[in-house]
Image: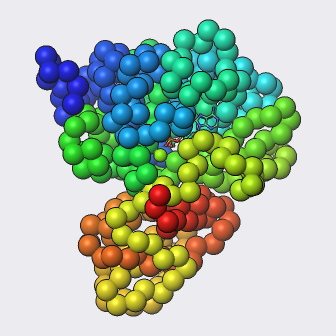
Amino acid sequence: MMNGAQTVPERPNLAQAAALIRAGQLCAFPTETVYGLGADATNPDAVLSIYETKGRPRFNPLIIHCADLAMAETLVTFTPLARDLAARFWPGSLSLVLPAKPGNGLADVATAGLDTVAVRVPDHPLARELISAVGRPVAAPSANPSGRLSPTTAEQVRRGFGGRVPVLDGGPCQAGVESTIVRVEGERLVQLRAGAVAREEIAAAMGRPVEVVGEDAGIAAPGMMLSHYAPNAGIRLSAEPRPDEAYLAFGPAAEFDGPTRNLSPAGDLREAARNLFSMLHELDASGAAVIAVAPIPETGLGEAINDRLRRAAAPRG
Ligand code: TXA
Ligand code: MG
């Protein structure tokens, strides 16, 4: 991909990655949640090529990644409650949906023309150094073709895009599922997407409930399409594996002869979240037509894990 005149390094270092993004090119980079496909959020053409490369619908806005709170303050308006959230959870895996500041310089396509922006400061040193070196906010969806499994290693990004996207390699992601998205509405907190920070943790830290948008409220984060995160294999949830299937286990699991991965033999949800996408990638590569997935508790990070699994299992559109 990219322009033919100059060669784009397939494995850029930090300075090269920053130079690519400053020049309006794409570069994938690590965050603590999943790898992001980054572009200069102020450059409409660069942002458009994110949508083209992913095959992502244009109505689905992007999360804008900032090096620090000061950069985020140039883009959106923080209420005292929003500032408390940022102080408590940034850098980290919480994206805040806040009112856009007029004239913030963001490309309209990055926010799909909405009057709010989802912003976060990632908790990965390479990500923050990259954004600082770019010197501008970086728009970054997960670095996978739209609708497919999210990548938690540089190799998965390269494979997903057939080697056409340069990737800054920062090793495997620590959290393994995407950020939690919370909209701040006056004094109310509304979770639009379960993610790497458990809802209970946010509620406890802020001393107030975190509401969940009901299914009947429509798509509150426009990207919350039902079928998403799809491996090639079909998925059966809360199921015992049958012969010829692959098995994604959780906790002390029964013996199974076919391809098996265990999200966490100890039943630890943080470990399970970290392993989720990688193990789905691996079981998918085994060629089994169906992956049976053991039941996973709905508490803590289980909310995000089960959300991703339900959408991986949903009928494909
Ligand atoms: O962990 C993450 O959040 C990763 C890494 C790369 O940071 N990024 C990520 O981006 O998951 P993406 O594009 O796959 O998901 C962005 C989500 C979509 O569901 C989108 O609809 C929602 O954020 N979103 C973005 N802006 C929004 C807004 N103004 N209001 C509501 N939802 C918004
Ligand atoms: Mg995604």
In this orientation, does residue 104 appear? yes
**Where residue 70 sits: x, y (%)?**
61, 17
Number of numbered discs overlaid on the protein picture: 0
Residue 102 occupies which quadrant of the picture?
A: top right
In this orientation, does residue 265 appear? no
- As drawn, is 43 to the left or to the right of 301? left
**Depth order, front residue of 129/103:** 103
Query: Residue at horizontal 84%, vertical 46%?
Result: 207
Query: Residue at horizontal 68%, vertical 66%?
Result: 299
**Depth order, front residue of 266/242:** 242
Q: Quadrant of the N terminus?
A: top left
Residue 101 occupies which quadrant of the picture?
A: top right
- As drawn, is 27 to the left or to the right of 266? left
- As drawn, is 140 to the left or to the right of 184? left
Which color scheme did the rendering employ for the protein?
Answer: rainbow
Query: Residue at horizontal 43%, vertical 51%?
Result: 147
Q: Is residue 113 above or below residue 279?
A: above
**Where residue 126 sits: x, y (%)?**
39, 32
Query: Residue at horizontal 79%, vertical 50%?
Result: 211
Q: Is residue 250 above or below residue 209?
A: below
Q: Is residue 289 above or below residue 30?
A: below
Q: Is residue 88 above or below residue 79?
A: below
**Where residue 300 sits: x, y (%)?**
66, 61
Residue 7 occupies which quadrant of the picture?
A: top left
* Residue sitting farthest toward the top: 103
**Where residue 316 sits: x, y (%)?**
46, 61
